[in-house]
């Protein structure tokens, strides 16, 4: 069994064949998928997808790209929406200095609201961080000092220092198809140093398809290829890496029920 801890099934890329995409994931052994919110204003459509499939759950939150337009989204609103049984995470939220689509102060303010919601609900915060390692580490350190909260550094492509900070504070690190790219030697070196009980895999689909599908549209079924490379990096078999990352997922995403029967 595998879990795709981060996908975007609400994106237009999947609209015409969502049933087939979920079916292909299940056939590949990917028995749970978390479709991730990027706009609270569009949360009803994300929730509808999660409600339509037994294997799909969702998060609620505002991507840093959209922080400027959703600056009014409070921790209380996130907490209220997260009460739904199908909502198993907060986010994705964080800092993106690569695109800088929202003012940086708005990104930070929104991020702190999401941290407060994660702390209050106990749901894992899905963190997006790009070209913002120092500020991200500083906020994580400061906010953790106010009280611990569960979190995951998703689609990790940052430097080793941020990974070390996240792990020190109790966070998990999730790797996407980037891990499989030929030039990702440094990222594989970082993955090899992450404690085994803090590792997760994801697709971030429809983006970042792993080798040998790089450049094509990604989908949850393809997380098996990322898991394979992660296993090879750690010297683990496909079954071992599947068990490891799945156990880690359910330890972090405590609200999601674990399938009791293979294929359930």
Image (cartoon, grey):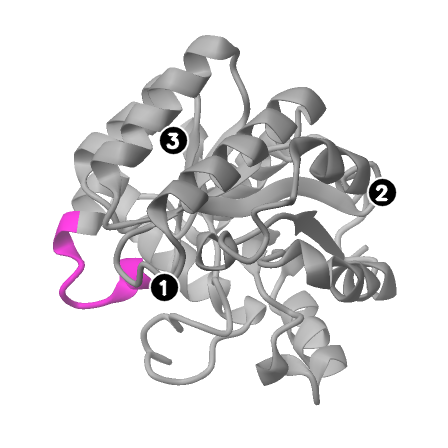
Foreground mark, 3 or 2? Answer: 2
Is 131 or 161 nearer to us in this picture? 131
- 117 relative position to 131: left or right: right
Q: Which residue range is magenta in the image?
A: 177-186
* Position above or below: 147 against 159: above
Is 251 one of the magenta-colored residues? Answer: no
Q: Earlier in the sequence, mark 2 or mark 1?
A: 2
Find residue 116 and report its horizontal and vertical position in percent.
59, 25
The answer, for residue 196, to whether it is visible in the render is yes
Element under disc 3: helix
Distance from the alpha carbon under mark 3 to that under mark 1: 18 Å
Badge 3 local density, few (<14 within 10 Å), some, or many (20+)?
Answer: some
Distance from the alpha carbon under mark 3 to that under mark 2: 31 Å
State the quadrant of the C terminus.
bottom right
Element under disc 2: loop
Q: How many marks?
A: 3
Is 180 one of the magenta-colored residues? Answer: yes
Q: Disc 1 designates what residue?
A: 177
Q: Overall secondary structure of the magenta stretch?
A: helix
Q: Disc 2 designates what residue?
A: 84
Q: Residue 196, which numbered label? A: 3
Find residue 122 and report its horizontal and vertical position in percent.
66, 24
- 248 relative position to 128: left or right: right
Q: Residue 29, which numbered label? A: none
């Amino acid at each position: 069994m595998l879990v795709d801890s981060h996908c975007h099934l609400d994106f237009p890329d999947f609209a015409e064949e969502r049933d087939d995409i979920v079916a292909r994931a299940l056939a590949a052994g990917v028995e749970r998928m978390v479709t991730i919110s990027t706009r609270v204003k569009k949360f009803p459509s994300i929730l509808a997808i999660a409600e339509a499939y037994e294997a799909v759950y969702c998060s609620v939150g505002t991507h840093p790209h959209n922080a400027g337009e959703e600056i009014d989204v409070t921790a209380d609103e996130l907490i209220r929406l997260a009460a739904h049984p199908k909502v198993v995470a907060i986010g994705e939220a964080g800092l993106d200095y690569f695109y800088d689509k929202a003012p940086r102060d708005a990104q930070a303010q929104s991020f702190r609201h999401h941290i407060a919601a994660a702390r209050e609900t106990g749901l894992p915060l899905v963190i997006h961080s790009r070209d913002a390692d120092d500020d991200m580490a500083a906020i994580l350190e400061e906010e953790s000092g106010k009280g611990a909260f569960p979190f995951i550094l998703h689609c990790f492509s940052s430097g080793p220092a941020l990974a070390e900070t996240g792990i020190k504070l109790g966070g998990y690190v999730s790797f996407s198809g980037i891990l499989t790219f030929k030039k990702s030697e440094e990222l594989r070196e970082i993955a090899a140093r992450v404690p085994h009980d803090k590792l997760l895999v994801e697709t971030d689909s429809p983006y970042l398809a792993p080798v040998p599908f790089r450049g094509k549209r990604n989908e949850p079924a393809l997380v098996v290829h990322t898991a394979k490379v992660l296993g090879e990096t750690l010297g683990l078999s496909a079954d071992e890496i599947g068990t490891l990352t799945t156990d880690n997922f359910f330890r972090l995403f405590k609200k999601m029920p674990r399938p009791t029967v293979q294929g359930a």
